[in-house]
Image (cartoon, grey):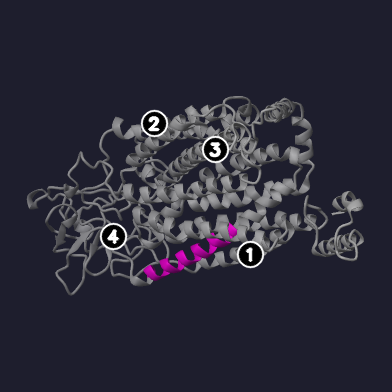
Amino acid sequence: MGETEKRVATHEVRCFSKIKMFLLALTWAYVSKSLSGIYMNTMLTQIERQFDIPTSIVGFINGSFEIGNLLLIIFVSYFGTKLHRPIMIGVGCVIMGLGCFLMSLPHFLMGRYEYETTISPTSNLSSNSFLCMENRSQTLKPTQDPAECIKEMKSLMWIYVLVGNIIRGIGETPIMPLGISYIEDFAKSENSPLYIGILETGKVFGPIVGLLLGSFCASIYVDTGSVNTDDLTITPTDTRWVGAWWIGFLICAGVNILSSIPFFFFPKTLPKEGLQDDVDGTNNDKEEKHREKAKEENRGITKDFLPFMKSLSCNPIYMLLILTSVLQINAFINMFTFLPKYLEQQYGKSTAEVVLLIGVYNLPPICIGYLLIGFIMKKFKITVKKAAYMAFCLSLFEYLLYFLHFMITCDNFPVAGLTASYEGVHHPLYVENKVLADCNRGCSCSTNSWDPVCGDNGLAYMSACLAGCKKSVGTGTNMVFQNCSCIRSSGNSSAVLGLCKKGPECANKLQYFLIMSVIGSFIYSITAIPGYMVLLRCIKPEEKSLGIGLHAFCTRVFAGIRAPIYFGPGACRMYNINNFRRIYLVLPAALRGSSYLPALFILILMRKFQFPGEIDSSETELAEMKITVKKSECTDVHGSPQVENDGELKTRL
């Protein structure tokens, strides 16, 4: 091998290694940003309880990430490619880490979490003021209807979480657009799909880790290390429980900052992958032309902005796609944001269990669906039109299956005076002014406290006092209440802390719900890719960057920010499950249902729209016949191409 060949080979290996190293670093950044994003969603219930804030504020905190993202999206879209992209990505990762750290600060600045209770963890018989005793009275009763669950904020420390999430959104802005453009500029065109596929894998792996982290942190008490957890009178299944949400944010902060380090060592530009630096300088000319072309594109961005905007706004398929996406994402965000709370209330699961179930049942089918639809479209050469028709039908089928969720329901927890009578008769609606009964009327119990106990008769009571209990044994979660006058059973009329568990029938219904979630997640994934392909193909190549950015802008403004705020179902210890189910299921159903009307118009318009690079099967067969004829015209009797028609043969083929 000559000196020139060695130099060329060394150059190609060095260039290839840099692209691969950048891809590895960017994948890590994708994992870290999706990790912190999904962890934030899993901890919304814990944040709500920690700061005693209404769900509308929780929704605003969740949407604040989109606010931060929008603050810089225009700057990044138009000027980011002119700057040092790897350094900008690294700075973005650092900013994300700082945002996560700021979100954890309230835990260190505010006092210990004090949950609502009347029980002293070290109570004894002489100081059991929470039991059935005379000469004590309270007149207020708790509320359970979502419309009435409005809390008075006890602290403004949640603003740290809000600002931290905005900063996290600002830091995330340059990662995806600048990272993908860097790869597109300096990687071979045939390698780009593979590289972007690896990045998408990182976006899926991050949520899996985030859900596992959320489940782990939610099972640890928020003040672990500073309180004796043996003295706690609540468990992770209690609605007053707050997990150690701050631990996960510290971990996310560290991961994001570590992911920023490699980007500070990458150059502003790389040689185009595949270009060889020949001795005569041909490669330098190619690279220079490549840079000049990029500069011209950057200079034309602002000049072409208004014409491109006019062209996009006059594109009916594109505008209908934006409308469809806004409606669909509104429904999706509402369902996903409050899914943990719904499963807690509906099926009696703890936050840690719910988060783990969501990760196990929802993410794997989405991964499989993405890979499967991509393989099918490539293997069988399915056009975008056919894929769109198929996606519409499957999505409509899944939407009809969605209504089965209205049947997969459990009853309220049986609580005397709220959802059931003291005789154990269940009421489907809220029982008003029935908190007191003959068995506890002489106890002078507080009627606005929430310290539920479960009697051995299978019925729960708002407190040991309202159960008529006169004696307690043990401490912490092992406390047992005895001699309870309201508990009529064949046993010793005793009760233990916490609500009574829902029966095996409810556990079976949870399995049905999760199976439906698997089916829905899978169908969603195989319909999302064709929809995104329609978006990419319905706009001109020169408008593609602006079109994708405008689509993201509209979905974030009209769905990502607004949806969690207006949807909030209140913040209650226990809900009227029928009202909560209607709020949680009906609104997303209405939003999704309305999205199929513009989607139907898209299919109608697509019948007359010719996508670039796609022809019908009949046209393909005709083209193949023409090629066969032209080949025969250009061969001799022995089947060999005629030398004098070689140029014509190439042109025709």
Residue found 44% across the figure and 44% down from its top: 35
Q: Which mark is residue 499?
A: 4
Of badges 4 and 3, nearer the viewer stands 3
Q: Which residue is mark 3?
A: 13
Kind of element beneath mark 2: helix
Which of the two discs, 2 and 4, sits closer to the camera? 2
Q: Among all residues in the image, which is located at the extreme front? A: 2
Segment colored magenta: 506-526
Q: Position of residue 21 (x, y in %)?
A: 50, 38
Q: Earlier in the sequence, mark 2 or mark 4?
A: 2
The residue positioned farthest toward the bottom in the image shown? 490
Q: Which quarter of the figure is the C terminus placed in?
A: bottom right
Q: CA distance from mark 1 to mark 4?
A: 41 Å
- Looking at the image, residue 527 sits to the left or right of residue 62; the answer is right
Whole-number angstrom distance, CA of label 1 to CA of label 3: 46 Å
Comes first in the chain, label 1 or label 2: 2
Give amino acid for label 3: Val
Closer to the N terminus: mark 1 or mark 3? 3
Viewer can see residue 579: no
Amino acid type, residue under disc 1 in the picture? Leu
Q: CA distance from mark 2 to mark 4?
A: 36 Å
The residue shown at (75%, 35%) is 309
Q: Which residue is mark 2?
A: 102
Q: Please state the horizontal and vertical placement of residue 192, each as a whole percent of the image.
A: 62, 44
Is there a contact, CB below 8 Å, between mark 1 and mark 4? no
Q: Callout 4, which amino acid? A: Leu
